[in-house]
Image: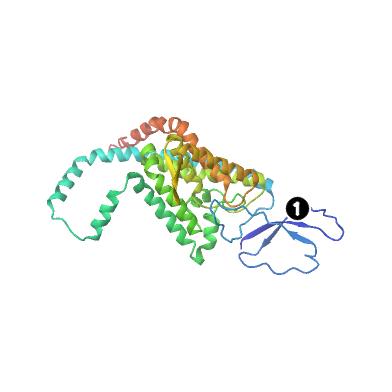
Amino acid sequence: MTSACWILKACTRRNWCHGRSFLIEQRNGFRRAPPKKPEQIETELKKSHDTPSQSSFTPPIAEPIHPARIHIAKQLYKPFLFTVGFSGCSFGIAAIWQYESLKSRMSNYFEDIRADWLEKMRPPKHGNFRKQVNEWWNSLSEGQRTVSGIIAANVLVFCLWRVPSMQRTMIRYFTSNPASKSMCLPMTLSTFSHFSFFHLAANMYVLWTFSSSIVSILGQEQFLAVYVSAGVIASFASYVSKVATGRFGPSLGASGAIMTVLAAVCTKMPEARLAIIFLPMFTFTAGNALKAILALDAVGLCLGWKYFDHAAHLGGALFGIWYALYGHELIWKKREPFVKIWHEFRNKPPRNGGT
């Protein structure tokens, strides 16, 4: 059963509590709690501290909460270490992937020429569905082809939310909450999780729109490393905000990672002209758009707005700005020693003299 916790203010006839807040833990899963006796609820006033998700829609779920905020604050070192380790591994894998990709392209260069020559010699196939799909795929930019896999993963997770038997698993592993029993893995999986169709459509539209620009700036491998790292960093920023304010609750969505993409593009191309999809006649520069977004999320975080997870948005945006200005030089351009180690390991001869 899932443990749910609410913050209540209780006062009895004797006035001995004086409005003090305490945590009441009740294990009731997803069923309504049994009614209490009249003498137990005579003067209780329930006050919920719901924190909205990174999305524009929060699913009606019971999120497990630990009894004390101080206990959760002590556990933040685990998400911090996970954030650092996961981000480092992401960039390391991206560097190895780029190395292997370049090596494969060089070795298959002549084979590709031969395959193209044979394809031209074959008679063309008209009305073939596979050919039409290939033509559509080849018409996409490199960035659009790169984010197609991310969009497919988000759509798959969105469908899993509609499976009743998957609800408990989705809540535990595909929503991030510092008060949950699973803290680290959901920081990554929640980036691909959307409960609302409107939230999914809006995020994927923004990702698709900026995909060509960000991939042309960073490249395919570096972009994927930045994207998955941004999701974890945005989740950690949300964790810190929730622990500091005491407003615990589930968060899900790719908004934090997409804010990183948006901020990086706007930082690299501040004079680019942007427009709102519903108001194409009004245009503005990318730099001004980024300033407005940062200001909106900062005000929302300070005032405690609950419609978005503003801490995750700010964390993702600040990471995108930092990476566009400094991160590329400090991380990606210094990958040569690591790639050299991988190259030596990759081409190291067998110890036993085997072939």
- In the rendered image, the quadrant that contains the N terminus is bottom right
Which color mode does the image show?
Answer: rainbow
Q: Residue tagged by mark 1?
A: 21
Q: Going 75% across and 60% down the picture, which residue do you hit?
A: 45
Residue shown at 40% from the left, 48% from the top = 208
User: What amino acid is labelled 1 in the image?
Assistant: Ser
Residue at 82% across, 53% down: 18
Which residue reaches farthest right? 14
Q: Which residue is farthest front? A: 281
Pick the front one: 274 or 29: 274
Visible residue check, residue 218 = yes
Tell me: 285 left or right of 50: left
Secondary-structure class at tag 1:
strand
* Percent coordinates x, y for residue 59 in the rendering: 56, 60
- The residue depicted at 46 percent of the width and 39 percent of the height is 286
Q: Between residues 328 and 301, which one lies in front from this camera angle? A: 301
Residue closest to the eye, 200 or 338? 200
Confirm whether residue 355 shows in the render.
no
